[in-house]
Amino acid sequence: MKHPLPAFHLARLLWPVIVMGLLACSSEPQSSCTGDCEDAATSSDGAVLDSTTDTTLADTTAATSCPAQPSWQGKTSIFEELSVSKLGLAGVQGTILSVVDYNADGWPDLMVRKGGADNFAENERSNWLLRNDGKGNFVDVTEESGLFKPRLSSKPGQGRPARVVVFADVDNDGDVDAFLGQPRTDISETNAHTSELAINQGDGTFDLGPAQSAARFEQVISSPAGATFVDVNLDGKLDLWVVHNERPGLVPVQDRLLLGDGKGAFTDITNSAGLTTSPWQSTAAMNNAQAHSWGWSSTACDLNEDGRPELLAASYGRAPNHLWVSQTAQNGASVSYANQSIASEYAFDNRQDWRDNLNAQCYCRDNPSAAECDTCPKPQSDQVCASLAQAFGPNYRWNHSYGRQPFQLGGVTATTICADVNQDGHLDLVNFEIVHGDVGTSSDPTEVLLNDGPDGLLHFSRLGPEVTGLARPHDTPFWDHGDMTGAVFDADNDGRADIYVGGAEYAGTRAHLFRQQGPLKWQELPTSLFFDHKRAQGVAIADFDRDGDLDVVVGHSRHRCEGAAAAECQKDEQVRYFRNVVGNKQRWIQVQLHGSAMSNKMAIGARVTVRTADGAVQAQVVDGGHGRFGFQRSHTLHFGLGSHCDAEVTVHWPDKQATSETHVLEAKHRWRWIQGQQPTKA
């Protein structure tokens, strides 16, 4: 356990009770809209009304027209696997999955990638854009869409590579465009593919964006590992946060913030925004997260609820993660960020004792006069050291000069997700990490980072997986957690956030599903209650069949499948599809947002809260891309409601006016919500 539960967290656990008390006692009318927008209708007691339901929040215990719904009791599986052949997914392979509605027809489509370029002429495939036809089929439209059209001349049927792909409406014309990030570490190579913008033509096809754009990184070394669309100055034009990995020689490079012009071109404002970091030369700078991240993924969301998004870069190699807090004026006159990586505790946790690292113990056994080795315990046995030496060489998995420094005592953070994990209406973080048992407890585990609240300096408490139920015990010192992908979603529509962990690339890794039992308490489900999937890398979650619950598509990694490990690997990286069969037994609401002239068309960065009659509050954010090499959640937000018949839904729009709008919406419907207008059933 890393922290005792602070007093303010006890208050957060009682939040539903507090909210209900305030609602019962308040006699002041509640405005349904703040900022420059029209007032929505309110009842005489101040509750916000929806134009279609004309009702205040219902209590299911008293509403005879809204009977209680049966909850899932854990006796049957949440999912059933569907045949990929019948779905049109046979032969679709990959480890990087995203949800996108590329043709704006309201049905979630699927992006699947495994790295590399397509050769359509020879049917050698690496990327799939799959149209959901709304009839239970996915149609491969990759080649005809032109999404991977190369700028360089190429043979007919030849596509282009892209390590990172994320989607957003960069020109605000109502359809999604895409950023395709590709490493280019030698800027003198004029025949190498650059990163590109692909602009949607409105007919389901894409064309190349402007040739003159900082998003192509023609003049700077680039190695995109994650990208996130975000509106940093709230001008309604989407910007782009790109986290970079390394150039040859394991040399980390600068992350970059690009300001969008609303037409598909971008300008690099990294330096002027205060985001410049230093090369890996000063130990002090590295320990203080002031050197380059060793970027592995990106995300962005408004964590302190001031209306302006924070920027996050998760790092490889146990290097510090970076958290940049917006200092930008509300009018967006100038973009500015402050580094709060260490102060927020996002950089790494406070477990800094390197002495239980078996590699360090073996090194100190061999070098007893080395600094601080007199304080290091002896290894359990010589056999442990022999095994480590065989795997990693005579120095084991250990560098005594740097291994004791804070910048090497963090995690290997593959993905960070912004999510409200405890239903208090504030966005928390969940980190998904690679951890090896032999390196000891100083390596950050997959865990929840609880947001201490929007007031004051942004800070997260790491309660630890042992406290929250996310721990996975082992009876041997040699184990691996390859948690590179994950998701936070409500699997059974009970109104609580469940956590999916995709473990891959190491022997014994698989998919895990942790169901939330109560505030900040999760329980791992046996595979018989969801699905058994080994080497689970890549996940896409959406209501693909639009029946009111969330379905799951998972990828598969064949990395390190040699020898005895081959038995747990598929013959290829074929994706698998699991249909949710229990979630829609309970109630739910789906919200599809559309910005007005004040905010970006896709409402990326909008924070949505849903309050039910029991006082519980859920929060989600419209995702502009996250995770290692570019994952993306559905832009249609899904909230489980349990037995509640409706919910009070508030949208905090990403605009300079800090506009918010509130309506009570009826359950079991998808709602189309255009900023400044009444929501309508979609």
Image (cartoon, rainbow, N blue to C red):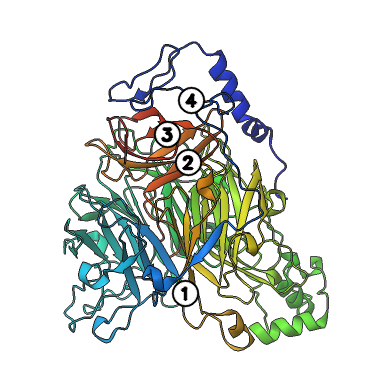
Disc 1 versus disc 2: distance between alpha carbons?
A: 47 Å
Residue farthest to the bottom, as pictured: 563
- Looking at the rendered structure, the kind of residue marked 2 is Trp
- Looking at the rendered structure, the kind of residue marked 3 is Asp
Compared to residue 411, the image places residue 326 above or below, namely above
How dense is the environment of label 2, judged by Cα within 10 Å: few (below 14), some, or many (20 and up)?
many
The residue that label 2 is drawn on is: 588
- Which residue is at 75% across, 66% downward? 356
The residue that label 1 is drawn on is: 250
Which element type, helix, strand or loop, lies under badge 3?
loop
- Answer left or right for 310 relative to 441: left
Asked if the residues shown at circle 4 and circle 2 are in contact, with their CB atoms under 8 angstroms apart, the answer is: no
Q: Position of residue 401 (x, y in %)?
A: 63, 70
The residue that label 3 is drawn on is: 306
Camera-nearest residue between 6 and 341? 6
- Looking at the rendered structure, the kind of residue marked 1 is Leu
Could you tell me how many numbered marks the image carries? 4
Q: Position of residue 13 (x, y in %)?
A: 64, 34
Residue 668 seen in render? yes
Compared to residue 495, the image places residue 248 above or below, namely below
The residue that label 4 is drawn on is: 57
Q: Position of residue 319 (x, y in %)?
A: 54, 62
Asked if the residues shown at circle 1 and circle 2 are in contact, with their CB atoms under 8 angstroms apart, the answer is: no
Compared to residue 178, the image places residue 113 above or below, namely below
Disc 3 versus disc 2: distance between alpha carbons?
A: 28 Å
Which element type, helix, strand or loop, lies under badge 2?
strand
- Looking at the rendered structure, the kind of residue marked 4 is Leu
Disc 3 versus disc 4: distance between alpha carbons?
A: 28 Å
Sequence-first tag of 4 and 2: 4
- Answer left or right for 143 relative to 649: left
Disc 4 versus disc 2: distance between alpha carbons?
A: 14 Å
In the image, which is nearer the foreground, mark 3 or mark 2? 2
